[in-house]
Structures are given as C-alpha cells and as structure tokens.
Image (tube, helix red, strand yellow):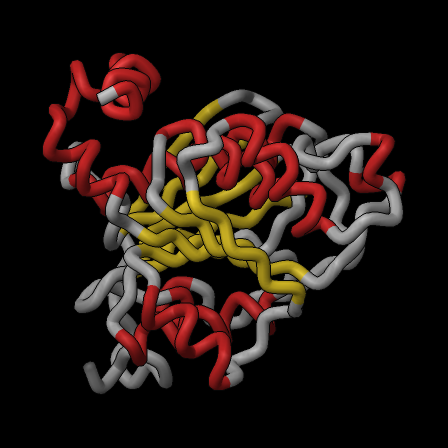
Amino acid sequence: MRGLSDALQRYARQISLWGLESQEKLASSTVLVVGLGGLGSAVALYLAAAGVGKLVLVDSDSVSLSDLNRQVLHWTRDIGRMKVDSAVEKLRELNPGVEIERVKASFKPTPKMRELVRAATVVVDCLDNWKSRLALNDLCVKLGKPLVHAAVEGMQGHLTVVAPGAPCLRCIFKNPLDRAPAPVIAPVPGILGAAEALETLKLITGYGKPLTGKLLVYDGFSNTVEVFEAERRPGCPACGRR
C-alpha cells in the first residue's frame, strides 16, 4: 500500500490529466533510448521522472569535458566514466521505481540490437550521425516499432515520429549529411530531447496527438516552430514495400 500511495503522489500531476489507466500503461512499458548525449540526457531524465516502467540505455562513449555544456546527465565528476554508468546513477536517484538496463555498445543492427528493438514499446533515436540513425530507422520499420527521432545543430533542430504506415526517415531525408563535430548551443538538445520524451509518452499512453507523418522544425535563433506534413516516398528502400 505504501508503494501505491507513493506512486500516486509522485505522478499526481500527470494522473490528473490522463488518468490512472494511462499511468499504468506507462508503468508497464519499455523504452529503448539509443544515445546518451544531449538529446538522450533530456529524454532519459523526463521518461524516468514520468514513471516509464523500464528504460534500456544504449551508448558506447565515455564522458568528456566538451560534453558538459549540453549533456546534463553527466557532471564534471563523471569525466572518463562510461555514459551509461553516469546516467544510471542519476536516474536511479531521481526515480528508484524505474527499472534500468544499461547496454555498453554503439548502435549497429546486430542480433542483440534487433532483440532490444523487438522488446521495446517505443524506440527513441538520440544518435549523432545519419548512418546510425538510418540503420535504426530501418530496423524499427522492419519490426513495426514506433521510433521517435530528433536531431540538432547550432540553434536548430527537428523532430518526427516514425510509425507503421507513416513516412520513415528515408522518406523525409533523402540525402542527409553529417557535420562532425556539429556545433550546438547548450539548451537546444534539451528542448528537442524534452519534446522527444513527450512524443514517447503520447505513444505509450494514447494521450495527445503524436507527430506521426509530420516534421517539426525548431529555430532557436528566432524561437519559432513550424510543422510540415511528411509524405511517404514511392520506392523508399525502408518502407516503400510496407
């Protein structure tokens, strides 16, 4: 009874909006977060705070000094530590009720990653390069799993949700290019990562309208947001035959 009472208090502001049934859906869900940089830090923090049942965190990097302007899960004391270890420590302190699995690996479409995607309720793309993003997109499309994607550069970013029957990343971004290392202003990945977390909560609970089939573009320079309709591309190598 104490545990139930604590949960009702912790999530009271959410439950007052979407009801106990939606909170229970959240508590029984598994979210796969791929990448624990600027986007992944915000995503993992807000999903843990909201009460996702299980977080699976995938990253192969260690914390460096240049990460600390934007990757808020990692602090000065964490320099040199694996990002998954740094993240798990903070998230467990924030919400001990969330189960967390750490995977110390870079994303590649291996049998292990395939099983992680298959077991997830929602997959969140917090990666920093297009080769990996598109590989994750392809795997989610193949397995029919919803994918929340965002990317940032400078003072700009974009966000979309890929779901069965909707345009995938290969439909929306035909020839994406990486700029490494991409410049970025500290709050921008926090803004887009928080938005990714919100889209994830919508998909799990059914409360709200996800950005499926739409592309949200954020411009931090003028602090404006535009939302565009996205279309499936005939002959798309990922979803064209589905």
Left or right side of 12 for 127: right
Marker count (numbered): 0
Q: Residue at x 37, y 50 (%)?
A: 160
Q: Is residue 64 above or below residue 97?
A: below
**Residue 199 falls in image quadrant:** top left
* Residue 141 occupies quadrant: bottom left
**Where in the figure is residue 93, as x and y percent of width and height?**
57, 28
- Residue drawn at the location 60% of the way across and 55% of the way down: 35
Q: Quadrant of the C terminus?
A: bottom left
Relative to the observer, which residue lies in front, 75 or 4?
4
Among the 4 quarters of the image, the one containing residue 163:
bottom left
Above or below, 139 relative to 178: below
For the question of whether residue 166 can be seen, the reply is: yes
Of residue 62 and residue 210, the one placed in the foreground of this image is 62
Left or right: 18 with respect to 235?
left
Residue 78, position in %: x, y?
A: 82, 39
> On the rendered structure, is 54 left or right of 72?
left
Residue at figure coordinates x 30%, y 25% from the top left = 3
**Looking at the figure, which quarter contains the N terminus?**
top left
- Residue closer to the observer: 116 or 156: 116
Q: Do we see residue 14 in this rendering? A: no
Which residue corresponds to the image point at 66% horizontal and 46% vertical from the top-left? 37
Relative image position of residue 162 (x, y in whole percent): 31, 59
